[in-house]
Image (tube, rainbow, N blue to C red):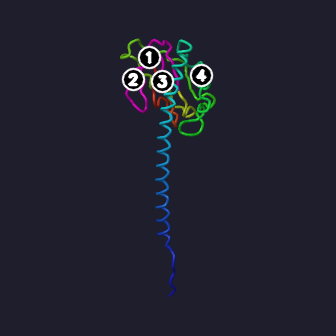
Amino acid sequence: MTKRSGFTLLEVALAVVVGLSIMYGVFLSYESKKESAGNSIARERLTTAMGTLEAYVASKGSLPVSGTGEFSKSWAGLHTEEKGLSPWGGPTGDPTLGVSEDAPLALGTNDPSAAPDVTNTSPVDPTRQGNLYYRSLANTAQYVKLAARSNPTPVAFHGYVMGIYDSKGNPWQWVSGGK
């Protein structure tokens, strides 16, 4: 009788399954760390954008009207290196300016406690992933409420709101605005 040496098909299949499982775990860990690092960069970018907006208001005396590109151009002029880069890697939805603006919100109230919630007024848009998002109110003396995906409790903002689209194109990942 001849003695054979080597692995059975079952042993080889088991080794492949174990190897793939380990590789999948490493991939998930990498993706999680990449998302977390991108989230930190996005929050920093939003804070920087708020400073840019405050400087704009100080020099011009009023908020830029959203949808006109005033804020987008101001941001792009000051932040040339990061304007087209998504915090999560790759280009932003608008690599020229890095900011998305829509027409001013036509709703609001003078009473912050009664302000309408505008969280769902901006659609999911994968072409805007990584972009800052600026929206002024038609009447900048009024308030609206907005909930961030990172904090679902609506907060009242005065005159404008600003946030950032996440890596999947969801608006209002983190938010800020006039107090």
Tell me what residue is drawn at x 50 percent, y 63 percent: 16
Q: Is residue 128 left or right of residue 107?
A: right
Q: Which residues are magenta?
A: 133-161
Kindly state the secondary structure of the residue where label 1 is placed: strand
**Mark 4 to mark 3 CA distance (whole Å):** 25 Å
Task: Residue lying at the far left in this picture: please name it.
Answer: 113
**Mark 2 to mark 3 CA distance (whole Å):** 15 Å
In terms of secondary structure, what is the magenta stretch mainly?
Answer: strand
Where residue 118 sits: x, y (%)? 44, 22
**Mark 1 to mark 2 CA distance (whole Å):** 10 Å
Q: N-terminal of the two: label 3 or label 1? A: 3
Where residue 173 sits: x, y (%)? 46, 31
Where residue 177 sits: x, y (%)? 46, 21
Callout 3–callout 1 Cβ contact below 8 Å: no
Q: N-terminal of the two: label 2 or label 3? A: 3
The disc labelled 4 sits on which kind of residue?
Answer: Ser
**Mark 2 to mark 4 CA distance (whole Å):** 26 Å
Query: Which one is closest to the eye, mark 2 or mark 4?
Result: 4
Kindly state the secondary structure of the residue where label 4 is placed: helix
Query: What residue would you read off at disc 2?
Result: 155
The disc labelled 1 sits on which kind of residue?
Answer: His
Kindly state the secondary structure of the residue where label 2 is placed: strand
Q: N-terminal of the two: label 2 or label 4? A: 4
Query: Which one is closest to the eye, mark 1 or mark 4?
Result: 4
Query: What residue would you read off at disc 3?
Result: 121
Q: Which mark is residue 158?
A: 1
Kindly state the secondary structure of the residue where label 3 is placed: helix
Query: What residue would you read off at disc 4?
Result: 74
